[in-house]
Image (cartoon, rainbow, N blue to C red):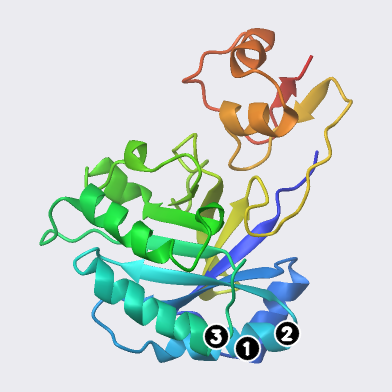
């Protein structure tokens, strides 16, 4: 059994103390996604502060734009200003965290427009699109409109998994040591660049967040074959601790 690498998503609610970051580091978190810009705010000071705190601890920092998609061009402009000022550079991973708004229509079109602007200074392979699972369930967004070359993060705390098989990253909790802190698993090493060694063992012990898709992808097994080996249906839930046959 190999643990998935962990990540932290930080914003204004994250404790702004060096001790908090030291505790994160001791827990094994080495990569932090920092909210640099927020729709309707010209400047988001929390992003500046948390970027410096994380870097002082020696963590790798990634950039996040939180958007309601109401003004894609303005969001991209303010984000790029903060991105440059704080020394983020080409090759940095960037999360576009979409928040639902009843006042915004045509969210798919607006998101495509925003991603086009961001792609001028960030490689498409370095862009992650993030959604709250509740917003997807309510129909505000459609993950099928997101091209496969973008990573997909799902925020679905306190559940058995992300709820979306295609998710490359899952924010699994918003609690850490009595503080508000979003933490998640980076299944395929998008943020952490952590490789995954294929096992030669005939069985795999399922981890928190696993689905048939994550297991098949990380072990290089054709999904229908994995289901056949385990006499399982695609809809069956994978439970942490469950023994999964690989061959």
Q: Are marks 2 and 1 in contact (CB under 8 Å)?
A: yes
Residue 20 place in picture, x, y as percent: 63, 83
Residue 180 place in picture, x, y as percent: 49, 74
Residue 81 place in picture, x, y as percent: 42, 84
Q: Are marks 3 and 1 in contact (CB under 8 Å)?
A: yes
Residue drawn at x 23%, y 56% as measured from the top left: 110
Q: Which mark is residue 50?
A: 3
Question: Gap between marks 2 and 1, in whole Å?
Answer: 7 Å
- Can residue 27 be seen at all in this image of the molecule? yes
Quadrant housing residue 40: bottom left
Q: Are marks 3 and 2 in contact (CB under 8 Å)?
A: no
Nearest the viewer among 224 and 144 is 144
Classify 103 as above or below 179. above
Residue 3 place in picture, x, y as percent: 75, 47
Report crowding for label 1: few under 14, some 14 to 19, many 20 or more residues within 10 A (C-alpha).
some
Nearest the viewer among 186 and 159 is 186
Q: Element under label 3?
A: helix
Question: Which residue is the extreme one toward the front?
Answer: 120
Question: Gap between marks 3 and 2, in whole Å?
Answer: 11 Å
Residue drawn at x 59%, y 12% as measured from the top left: 224
Report crowding for label 2: few under 14, some 14 to 19, many 20 or more residues within 10 A (C-alpha).
some
Classify 103 as above or below 48. above
- Is 27 situated left or right of 211 in this image? right
First in sequence: mark 3 or mark 2? 3
Nearest the viewer among 236 and 169 is 169
Residue, disc 2: 57
Residue, disc 1: 53
Nearest the viewer among 145 and 133 is 145
Residue drawn at x 35%, y 89% as measured from the top left: 43
Q: Element under label 2?
A: helix
- Can residue 12 be seen at all in this image of the molecule? no
């Amino acid at each position: 059994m190999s643990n998935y690498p962990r990540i932290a998503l930080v914003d204004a609610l994250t404790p702004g103390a060096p001790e908090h970051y030291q505790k994160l580091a001791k827990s094994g978190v080495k990569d932090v996604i920092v909210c640099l810009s927020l729709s309707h705010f010209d400047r988001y000071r929390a992003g500046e502060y948390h970027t410096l705190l994380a870097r002082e601890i020696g963590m790798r920092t990634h950039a996040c734009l939180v958007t309601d998609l109401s003004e894609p061009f303005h969001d991209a402009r303010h984000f790029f200003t903060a991105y440059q000022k704080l020394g983020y550079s080409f090759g940095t991973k960037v999360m576009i965290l979409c928040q639902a708004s009843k006042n915004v229509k045509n969210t798919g079109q607006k998101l495509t427009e925003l991603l086009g602007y961001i792609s001028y200074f960030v490689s498409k392979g370095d862009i992650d699109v993030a959604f709250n699972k509740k917003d997807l369930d309510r129909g505000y967004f459609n993950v099928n409109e997101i091209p496969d070359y973008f990573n997909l993060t799902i925020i679905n705390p306190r559940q058995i998994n992300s709820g979306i098989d295609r998710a490359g990253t899952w924010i699994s909790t918003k609690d850490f040591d009595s503080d508000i802190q979003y933490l998640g698993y980076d299944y395929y090493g998008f943020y952490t660049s952590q490789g995954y060694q294929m096992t030669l063992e005939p069985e795999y012990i399922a981890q928190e967040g696993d689905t048939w898709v994550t297991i098949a992808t990380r072990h290089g097994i054709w999904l229908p074959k994995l289901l056949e080996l385990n006499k399982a249906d695609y809809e069956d839930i994978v439970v942490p601790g469950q023994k999964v046959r690989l061959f």
